Image: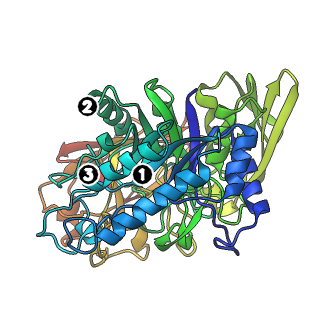
């Protein structure tokens, strides 16, 4: 039986770790409803309540001790005698206290002790000392687990083998336990979501005789922060721009990969619930890790929760994603519905938009759905053999947003500008996003660069670059299109490009640096474009270097 589950921290808002059995029972019920058949009890021994519940309902548990990230003090090359004794005691107690629970499948001996020199400031106090070797301690713990309980496998969750860490010195620890587990955050902390599959294949090829699993994957999801397109700009892994839609995107793409890997014996997403941590200032929270599929107070089940419920259960499930993005930036929207119905209908303001059947991965998607000014009632109707199941939400489009479309190119989350409503980057095809104040997510943020010549500085800071286009659905008519350009770094003569509007060249050989006369200075151009077939087609065509644009404002 393939395991599909979640990592679990037991704390909750208002109680911290002072939870009652009823709290654990509620959490367990929420996880079961989503279709979980396994829980990784991270990263410490959990109480007897959840073990009893798992026994009763047939849930498979991964138990582990809190040997996490560090296994030495300061620059010590080996674990101290006290630390070794403590780890041995915790492992012995974990096994003896939980060994008679039928639900417990394996004993986890450590989590992410293979950072090595990849994050010196996090793991060691000096860049000049050799990375301490965790293998002697791991082998000792593995042997202890075998002596205490020969009937169960040992397991280990790793962070860093084969990851995008350059020349960092990384110890290979997976072989220290029976079962391999990989914590991997492609598309979040590093790399692209599409890198996950080939990375797992490489781990499998290195150790073909060791069962491999994925023990953590996911992304932050703030329920009050939203995007019009999760591919429009860079997510801020250590900051505020962590929209709920990006979390859903990561889980959709990750599960597409994981579900297609038959050699994986189990997967556990991170995390079932938001949880407390004193090192986070991210998304819409402080001291909270927002990678949970359910909020810290258990009141909101995020969109990604229903993605898994639709995929992992036979329970009739229909859920319109983006429901908390109520006040929309654009009068058109891409609508995604998580539905395991044989047939799913989409209705907007009682008008049938379309019908989809057998949606891949239970994701039914409609592009460029028109919204009216004011309130819009969006209904997804799943037609099951047992009857129809509806999910209805309301989206609103302000009159100002209905009159003008303002695109913040290269932005994942659009800034708030007084008097103007911008949306995040959308309607694009090709190119890549960029930010003049780009930040890697580690260390202090660099001094902020300021764009001259605009009261809307935040809009001008991001851009789309390369060879790309925008296709914006519009009612037929004449439109003024104002384009904003900023040259991030190149000198005059290094970048030239045309702008083509509905097949006609509207701007020829634009050299932003030459026109601006100074770096980081906004340049604007206005063009008038007739729309006759319901679409504004803008193409940014490089002549020398890459084309670039920072903002697009379209007014009837």
Mark 1 crowd level (few <14, some 14–19, many ≥20, 10 Å Cα): many
Q: CA distance from mark 3 to mark 2?
A: 18 Å
| CB within 8 Å, label 3 to label 1 | no
Q: Which residue is mark 2?
A: 206
**Residue tagged 1:** 109
Tell how many labels.
3
Residue occupying image coordinates x 47% and y 56%: 91
Q: Residue furthest front?
A: 147
Circle 2 or circle 1, nearest the eye:
1
- Residue 450 in the image: x percent, y percent? 31, 76
Foreground mark, 3 or 2, reads 3
Q: How is the image coloured?
A: rainbow
Figure check: 432 above or below 384: below
Give the residue at mark 3.
135
Q: State which tag comes first along the sequence, 2 or 1.
A: 1
Q: Of the residues under marks 3 and 2, which one precedes in the sequence?
A: 3
Residue 26 picture location, percent across and down: 76, 55
Give residue 97's quadrant in the image.
bottom right
Gap in angstroms between the C-alphas marked 2 and 1: 21 Å
Badge 2 marks a residue whose secondary structure is helix
Q: Position of residue 65 (x, y in %)?
A: 47, 57
Q: Earlier in the sequence, mark 3 or mark 1?
A: 1
- In front: 456, or 412? 412
């Amino acid at each position: 039986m393939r395991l599909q589950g979640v990592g679990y921290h037991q704390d909750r808002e208002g109680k911290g770790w002072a939870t009652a059995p009823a709290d654990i029972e509620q959490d367990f019920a929420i996880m079961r409803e989503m279709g979980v058949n396994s829980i990784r009890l991270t990263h410490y021994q959990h109480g007897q309540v959840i073990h009893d519940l798992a026994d009763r309902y047939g849930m498979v548990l991964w138990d582990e001790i809190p040997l996490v990230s560090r296994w030495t003090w300061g620059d010590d090359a080996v674990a101290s005698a006290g630390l070794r004794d403590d780890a041995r005691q915790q492992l012995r107690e974990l096994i003896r206290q939980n060994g008679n629970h039928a639900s417990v499948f394996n004993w986890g001996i450590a989590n992410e002790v293979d950072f090595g020199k990849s994050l010196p400031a996090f793991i060691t106090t000096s860049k000049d000392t050799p990375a301490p070797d965790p293998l002697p301690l791991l082998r000792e713990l593995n042997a202890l687990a075998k002596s205490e309980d020969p009937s169960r496998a040992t397991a280990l969750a790793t962070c860093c083998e084969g990851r995008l860490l350059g020349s960092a010195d990384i110890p290979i620890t997976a072989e220290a336990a029976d079962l391999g587990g990989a914590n991997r955050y492609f598309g979040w902390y590093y790399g692209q979501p599409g890198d996950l599959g080939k990375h797992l294949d490489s781990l499998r090829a290195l150790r073909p005789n060791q069962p491999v699993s994925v023990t953590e994957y996911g992304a932050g999801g703030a329920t009050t922060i939203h995007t019009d397109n999760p591919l429009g700009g860079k997510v801020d892994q250590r900051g505020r721009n962590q929209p709920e839609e990006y979390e859903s995107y990561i889980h959709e793409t990750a599960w597409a990969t994981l579900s297609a890997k038959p050699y994986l014996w189990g997967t556990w997403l991170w995390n079932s619930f938001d949880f407390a941590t004193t090192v986070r200032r991210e998304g819409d929270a402080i001291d909270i890790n927002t990678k949970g599929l359910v909020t810290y107070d258990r009141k909101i089940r995020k969109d990604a929760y229903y993605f898994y419920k639709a995929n992992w259960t036979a329970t009739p499930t229909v859920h319109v994603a983006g429901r908390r993005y109520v006040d929309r930036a654009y009068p058109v929207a891409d609508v995604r519905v998580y539905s395991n119905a044989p047939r799913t209908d989409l209705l907007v303001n009682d008008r049938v938009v379309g019908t989809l059947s057998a949606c891949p991965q239970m994701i039914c998607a409609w592009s460029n759905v028109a919204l009216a000014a004011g309130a819009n009632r969006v209904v997804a109707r799943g037609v099951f053999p047992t009857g129809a199941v509806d999910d209805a939400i309301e989206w609103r489009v302000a009159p100002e947003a209905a009159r003008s479309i303002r695109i913040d190119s290269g932005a994942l989350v659009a800034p708030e500008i007084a008097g103007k409503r911008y949306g995040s980057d959308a309607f694009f095809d090709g190119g890549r996003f960029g930010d003049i104040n780009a930040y890697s997510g580690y260390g202090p943020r660099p001094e902020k660069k300021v764009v001259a010549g605009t009261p809307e500085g935040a809009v001008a800071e991001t851009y789309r670059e390369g060879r790309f286009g925008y296709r914006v659905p519009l009612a037929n008519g004449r439109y003024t299109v104002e384009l904003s350009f900023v040259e991030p770094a190149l000198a005059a003569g290094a970048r030239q490009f045309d702008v083509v509007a509905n097949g006609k060249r509207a701007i020829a050989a634009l050299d932003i640096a030459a026109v601006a006369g100074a770096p980081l200075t906004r340049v604007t151009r206005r063009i008038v474009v007739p729309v006759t077939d319901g679409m504004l087609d803008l193409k940014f065509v490089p002549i020398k270097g890459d084309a670039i644009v920072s903002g697009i404002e379209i007014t009837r």
